Amino acid sequence: MSRIFASFAATPADTELAAASSRQAHGGRDGRGIAKGRGWALGCNRLAATAPETGRQPYRLPHLPGIVAVLDGEIYNHHGLRRRLRARGHRLTDHCDGALLPALYAEYGTGFAQHLQGMFAIALVDLRARPRLVLATDDQGIKTLYYHCGPDGQVHLASELPALLAFSQVPARERDSGLDEYLTTGTCPGTRTALEGIRTLPPAALAVAEAGSGLRVWRRPTPTPPAGPPDDTALQEEAGRLAHADVPVCAVTTDDPASRLLTAAAARHRKHLDAPPLHSFHVSYSTRRSSAVHTPAGLVARRDGAVHHDVVIGPADLPELLPRTVWHLGQPHADPAALTTYAAFRAVRAAGFTAALSPEGATPHAPGPRPAGPHPGHWIPPYVASLAAVPRSLRETLYTPEYLHHVRSRGTAADHLAAALAAGPADRATAVTAFETGRLLPARHLRRLDHLSAAWAVQARLPYLQPATLTSRPPDSATRPGPHGAGHAPRPATPPARPRTARACLPETMLRPGTPLMELAHDTLAAGRLRADGRLDPVAVKSLLADQLQEPSPGRAEALWALLVYELWHQELRVLRPDRTLGDPPLQPALAA
C-alpha cells in the first residue's frame, strides 16, 4: 500500500508536490518518490508491504522508458502476471507487485486493469506518443482516488483529500447540497464529495486524460469470477491466503458474527500450518476506569488460538480521538464506527503489525425481499429515513430559512435518493443492493477503512470482498454453519431492520452533561466558533445543545454528533485553505498520526 498523487496537463510548483506528499506521508512511511516532466508529475508515499527491500515508486522499466506508474494497494496475482510477462520478453528484476505495471500496460493498453486481482488505485503516464494519463481502481472500490479537472483540461489527483488541496489550482468550495446530503445519509455517497468539483473514481473505473481533453471516466467491464467452493472453504482459503505477506499480518475483529468467522478461519489456518498464532484486535467503549474487559469477539478469538488484544477507549479519550479521525477522513463522516476503526489501527501499528485482515464487506446489505402489496414503493421512505444522521424533521429546523428554501427548490437529498430508488429495479432487494454496494459501501465503509488504516500506515486486507468469497455466498439461505462445522454459531441472514448497535449508541452515552465530549461539542458549536456560512442556523444549533444539556435524548445526541463532526471538518478545511474573508483567528490542525 502507498498513498499516491499526480498532476497532468499542469505544472505544479515543487512546493505543491512536497505539500501533497507531506499531507499523506502517514500512509507511506517507508519512502517517498516523485517523477515529473513537462506537464506531468507522479508521486507516492510508500508503505512497504510487498518486497520491502525493493519496490521503489514511481515504477519504471529500463526497456519501457516512456511509461511511469504509481500504485496504492496490492496486486494479489502479481506472481502469475510476472511469469506471463517474462514469457513475453519483458525484463522484470524487481519482485514488488507494482513493478510489473509498465509492462502490463505495454501489453494490454487501457485494458491492463482487467488482468489485476486485488485492491488498487493506479495512476500511469504514457509518454511514448501523445502524453496521456491513465487511472484505474479495483472492482469493489476498496482504494480511494480523489480527482479534480480544471477548466483547461488540467487533472490533479491524490489518495486523500487534504493532499489534493495542496495543489493551488484545486478549489476548496463547499457544494451547495453537500450539507443536506451529509445529514441525510451520514456521508456523501457515490463519487461526489463535500467539495465542489472534487470527485472520487467509482469502483472498476478506467479514466483517461490527454492534454487539453480533460478526464474521461468509464466503468470497465468486470468479468464474473468462476464459481468458488462452498462458503466455509472459500472464506478459509481467502483468509489463509491474505494472512500471508512479506510483513506481519494480524486481524481486526468486531462482535459481528461474520467478523468472528473470519478471525476463527485465519486463526485455525495458522494452527493448521503450525505457524505462530494470529493476533487479533477488538475495540470497545467503556465508561468504567478498568480496562479488564472480555468481549465476545475476544472470547471467540482466544478459543480458536489467537492472541487477542482488547482495546478500550473511554470518555476522556474522545476529545483527542475525534478531531484526529475527522482530519484523516478528509470530509464529513457521521458514523461513530470511524472512532473504532481509527483506534483499532492505532493499536495494530503500536503492536508492530503492517497488515491486518478486516471483516469489512462481510454483511450483505439488502434488507430482504420487497413486501408484496398494492404500493410497491412504500418501503422507500422508511429506508431513506433509516440512513439519516439527523432525522428530516429535525435537520430542517437546523437550516437557515434561505438554505431550507434552496434545498427544497432543488429537491432535498432525501427526495433525490427516494426518486433514484423508485426509478431503479422493481425488486426491493435488488434496488437496495445496487445502491448500497455501488454508492454507499465505497463511500461510507471502504473509504473509512482506507483512510483510517492509512492513518497508521497499516494495510487493511478484505477477504470478504475477494471474488471467490463473493461468488460463493448463498443468496437465499437464512443461516449457514461457521468454519468449524456443525454445532457452532450460524451466520444470520441480513435482518429487515437495522438494530441499534453499541457503536450507534456512542453519541447517546458520551454526549451527556458533564462528559468531555459534551464539553468539546459546546466549545465547538456554541462558543462563537460555529461558521456562519448561511446553511446552519447558529441559534437553532445552540438551542439543540441547550435541550440536550437539560434533557438528554438519543436523537439529539446523534444530531449533535453529526454537527460536531461537520464543524470539526470545517475547521480543518479552513486550516488547509484559509478563507481570508472570514476573519477567523488562526487554528491549529489536528496533527497527523
Image: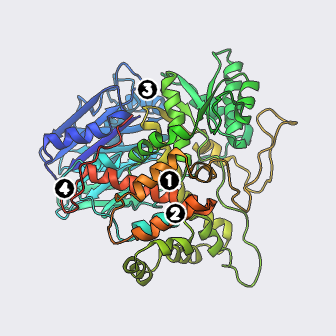
Residue 258 is left or right of residue 18, and the answer is: right
Q: Could you tell me residue 193's position as x and y percent?
A: 39, 60
The amino acid type of the residue labelled 1 equals Pro
Say the numbered circle drawn on residue 320: none
Q: Residue at x 48, y 27 (%)?
A: 349
Disc 2 designates what residue? 546
The amino acid type of the residue labelled 3 equals Thr
**Above-or-below relation of 202 to 142:** below
Disc 1 designates what residue? 442
Label whose residue precedes the other's in the sequence (2 or 4): 4
Disc 3 designates what residue? 50
Label whose residue precedes the other's in the sequence (1 or 2): 1
Label whose residue precedes the other's in the sequence (3 or 2): 3
Q: Quadrant of residue 376?
A: bottom right
Label whose residue precedes the other's in the sequence (3 or 1): 3
Which element type, helix, strand or loop, lies under badge 3? Answer: loop
Q: Residues within 10 Å of mark 2 (few under 14, many from 20)?
A: some
The amino acid type of the residue labelled 4 equals Gln
What number of labels is visible? 4
